[in-house]
Image (tube, grey):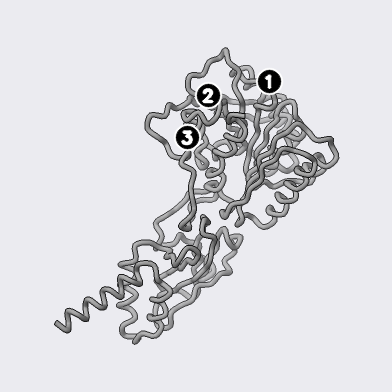
Amino acid sequence: MRSLALVIIVCMTCFRCFSGEPGEWLNRLQRMNPKKQQHSIDSFLLNTPKFPCFENDTTVYFFYHGPGHSIDIAGDFNNWRPVTKFHQIDGTSLWFLRLYFRTDARIEYKLVLNKTDWILDPLNPTVESGGFGNNSCFTMPHYDSSPMILEKEGVESGKTIKFSARSRFLNNTREITCYVPPNYDPLKNYPLILFHDGPDYIRLAYAITILNNLIHAKKIQPAIAVFVPPLDRTEEYAGKKQQKFVLFIIKELIPAIEERFSITKEPEFRAVAGASYGGNISLVLATRFTKQFGLVAAQSGYVQRSVFRDVKNKKPLSLTLYLDMGIYDIPVLIPRMQDFYSLASSKGYKVWFRQTPQGHNWKNWSDHLPEVLVYFFGEK
C-alpha cells in the first residue's frame, strides 16, 4: 500500500507540473538528485501536451533537449537577432528559456544551435509559412485570429482570371491575377482594390478567401481585386525603377483592367494596398494619383521621404488611409509609420492606425485584411 501511495503522489506531482507550472518543475529539477533528473526530464517531455509552455497569461517557457554548445532564439520580438540565450540545466541536455509577452501576442521564431544552425523548434509542431520560408510560432491565450481567413461551407467563390500585362516602360511582362466576385454583372460598376505582392496576398494572406467570406456575409460590397506581382521588388517599390513602375500601373495596367472589367471611375471606391515595401508603393500611387485611387492601405509600410514630403507640402488630398503594423515589427519601420500617421492626422486626412502584438509577417497582415476591406468597402 505504501508503494501504491508513493506512485500516486509522484503521478499527482507530475500532473501538476505538466498542467501549466513549468517554472515550479524547473526549480525542483535543479534541486533534484542528478541520478533522478533524466527520468524527470523524460517524463516532462513525454507528458507535457504543448510546447512552448505557458504559465499564467504572460509567461512563456521554451525548452530544447539535445547536445549543443549554445542555444539561442531569434524571432519577431528581438528583430530576428539570435542574442536571446537558453540556459542549460547542469549535468543534463535540457535547455530552457523564460520570456514574457502580452496576453494577446502572436510570435514567429526559430532556434539557433551553436550560433550557426537555424532550425524550427523540434518540440513545437505549429509552423507558419512566410515570405522567407517556414517559422515556428505560438499564440498567447488571448490572441484572436480573424475567422474570415477560413474557407466556409456554403460560401460561393468568385472567379480568378489571369492575363499577361506587357509594359513598354519597364520592358517586361508579368502575369496579373484578377478576382471577380460571384454573380458578376458587367452592367454594374464595381469597387476596385489593387494589391502589390499579389501572389503573396493570395497564398499567404488568404485574400481571395477573405473576399468571398466578406461578400457572402454582406459585410462589403462585391469588389474586383487585382493582384500584381513584382519582378524586381525593391527597385520597383522603392528604388530606381519606381517611376517606371508607377507609369506601368497608371498608364498601362489600369486601362487594361478597365477594358476587361466594369469598374467604377469614382476614386473613393478604388483602393491600392500593400505590405512593407508594397505599402510604400501603395502610398506613392495614392498620394500622386488621387483621381485613380481614393483609398490606400499600408501594412507595416516602409514610408519613404518623398511620401512624407508630398503629404506635408500638398493641400490635404481626398484620400482615406488605413495603416497598421506590429508592436514586434522591424524597429526602423515603427517610428516611420507612427510619424506618418501623426503627419497625416495633423493634415486632416481620414486615417485609421493600429498596432497589434505581432511581427513583420503575412499572418499579421492577413489577420487585419478583413478590417481593411470593411473600412474601404463596408456600409458607409
Disc 3 on helix, strand or loop?
Answer: helix
Q: Residue at x 36, y 85 (%)?
A: 32
**Front residue of this view, candidates 283 and 103:** 103
Which residue appears farthest toward the front when viewing the image?
380
- The residue at which mark 3 appears reads as 209
Based on the displayed image, in which of its 4 quarters is residue 12 positioned?
bottom left
- The residue at which mark 2 appears reads as 180
Where residue 291 sits in the image (x, y, percent)? 74, 26
Which of discs 1 and 2 lies nearer the camera? The answer is 1
Residue 326, above or below 188: below
Where residue 191 sits in the image (x, y, percent)? 61, 25
> In the rendered image, is residue 136 in sight?
no
> In the rendered image, is residue 9 in sight?
yes
**Front residue of this view, candidates 32 and 89:** 32
Disc 2 on helix, strand or loop?
Answer: strand
Report the side of 256 relative to 22 (left or right).
right
Based on the displayed image, in which of its 4 quarters is residue 285 positioned?
top right
Tell me the CA gap for discs 1 and 3.
26 Å
Where residue 38 sits in the image (x, y, percent)? 33, 78
Classify 10 Å Cα crowding around label 2: few (below 14), some (14-19), many (20 and above): many
- The residue at which mark 1 appears reads as 265
Q: Amino acid at mark 2?
A: Val
Where residue 288 sits in the image (x, y, percent)? 77, 33
Mark 1 / mark 2, whichever is N-terminal: 2
Q: Residue at x 67, y 24 (%)?
A: 254
Residue 76, above or below 228: below
